[in-house]
Amino acid sequence: MTEPALRIEHLTVRYPLGGRRFAHAVTDVSLTVAPGEIVGLVGESGCGKSSVARSVMALRRPDAGRVLIGGVDVTALRGAALRRARRDFQMVFQDPRSSLNPHRTVRQILTEGLAIQRVPRPWDDQVDDVLRAVGLDPATYADRRPRQLSGGQCQRVAIARAVLLRPRLLVCDEPVSALDTTVSAQVLDLLRDVRDRYGVAILFIAHDLAVVRGLCDRVAVMYLGRICETGAVDEVLARPRHPYTRALLDAVPRLDGAVPAGEALRGDPASNVDPPSGCRFHPRCAYASPRCAAEEPVLAGKDEAVACHHPLAPVKAG
């Protein structure tokens, strides 16, 4: 079997608050991304998506669990070994302009990673090739600084920087949320092209289900630090089994003004400092029973998995 580009095993991340209190950002999350696959990780703000991303990038060591990139446990690496491994996993950040050094030219920004990884010179051809791959003419843009670029052009540079080292995995943390609709669509098209050209796997962090539907192969839905549903994106978004996934879909505005038939979310998410017992969604769920408050549901299923004691019946396409 082909080794996954990314394998997350039972990841747990807590942030200390003092006085033996913790914010439970991520609890026992497991997820895989196959080579060349785009997997979306979605949920409301504060559900733990970015904490997963930071752990995958080894920017924050988990309290428990492992992150394997191409079979290598990056949570066990330190120092020079971790630096060498980083060429296999790169990140595209939410704010494209602030992720680039304002004092460097585009060419200098791109060659910095090559220098850190001690890639033999010359670099000019590699830089020119990757700029063309992201739709930027090297003669026009290589000597510009970020302030001379639009937001969409800055994100193209950030993507070029990320793929220049030919990584196995890109982690994209809300990469189009700071862009307008037209530019966002162009960047999403670019990510598809990058996947096809370089064979890179992508973990795509988002809160916009429309973006995920148009880009991703599979989706994992996260609520208050746990994954509650996962599967093929067309299946999960067309026939959601978890009440939270259904509520997220029902919350998406419709152009025709029609009112969705599903149940609206009730109240606000619970605190991750003192999460609810049992299913963490049960205080907001219209289908909750006493069992939901007492027993944590297990994520069960093969192609489409759901963590719910009372999963919704699949809606037949029609």
Image (tube, rainbow, N blue to C red):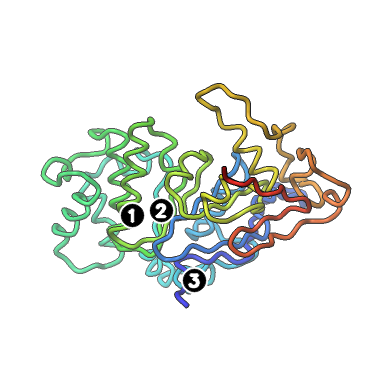
Q: Which residue is mark 3?
A: 77
The residue that mark 2 highlights is 91
Residue at 52% from the left image edge and 40% from the top image edge: 209
Percent position (x, y) of residue 13?
63, 56
Q: Is residue 191 left or right of residue 128?
A: right
Amino acid at circle 1 = Ala
Q: Earlier in the sequence, mark 2 or mark 3?
A: 3
* 207 up-or-down from 67: above or below: above
Is disc 2 placed on a helix, strand or loop?
strand
Mark 3: amino acid: Leu
Pointer 1 residue: 162
Q: Kindly indicate whether the residue at mark 2 contacts the one at mark 1 (C-beta within 8 angstroms).
A: yes
Placement of 121 over or under 252, stated as above or below: below
Question: Where is 26 relative to 9, above or below?
Answer: above
**What is the number of callouts on the image?**
3
Place of residue 250 in the rendered image (x, y in percent of width and height, measured from the top left): 62, 34
Locate residue 243, reporting x and y percent.
70, 43
